[in-house]
Image (spheres, grey):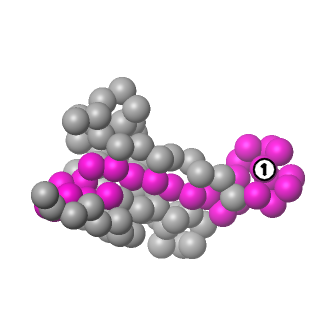
Amino acid sequence: MDAIVIRDLEEGDIGVIATTNGGPAWHGGETKWRGYWREHIEGLRVSMVAVVAETIIGYGSLCWCSHYPPFFDAGTPEIADMVVAEG
């Protein structure tokens, strides 16, 4: 069995993630992922992917400055996504 590798989102992952059929929880098109990539390289968000044998099987994202008012007011980061492909 191949190991699961967790790594930073790379720009080349955008098209792959956007077109992956990961089930109902797997969402977002290329526009979403271009935004995540931009925020990741600007240090506003940490976006990671889970990879098995060069196939992206999951992703997660943490926003340092949440848009959710109670988190924003408290200065609490927000886990925005944590999704594993259905298969």
Q: Position of residue 7 (x, y in %)?
A: 35, 69
Q: Is residue 44 left or right of residue 17?
A: right
Q: Position of residue 5 (x, y in %)?
A: 29, 66
Q: Residue at x 35, y 65 (%)?
A: 6
Which stretch appears magenta?
Answer: 50-76
Q: Is residue 7 left or right of residue 16?
A: right
Q: Residue furthest right?
A: 73
The image quadrant where one finds the C terminus is top left
For this rendering, which residue is in front, 76 or 52? 52
Q: Residue at x 15, y 61 (%)?
A: 2
Question: Compared to 86, does 33 lie above or below?
Answer: below
Q: Position of residue 41 (x, y in %)?
A: 48, 72
For this rendering, which residue is in front, 83 or 63? 83
Residue 9 seen in this snapshot: no
Residue linked to disc 1: 71
In the rendered structure, which amino acid carries the disc numbered 1?
Phe
> Local crowd at mark 1 within 10 Å, few (<14), some, or many (≥20)?
few
Question: Compared to 66, does 22 lie above or below?
Answer: above
Q: Is residue 72 magenta?
A: yes
Q: Quadrant of residue 4?
A: bottom left
Q: Position of residue 70 (x, y in %)?
A: 83, 45
Q: Residue at x 36, y 36 (%)?
A: 26
Residue 24 seen in this snapshot: yes
Question: Compared to 84, does 5 lie above or below?
Answer: below
The image quadrant where one finds the N terminus is bottom left
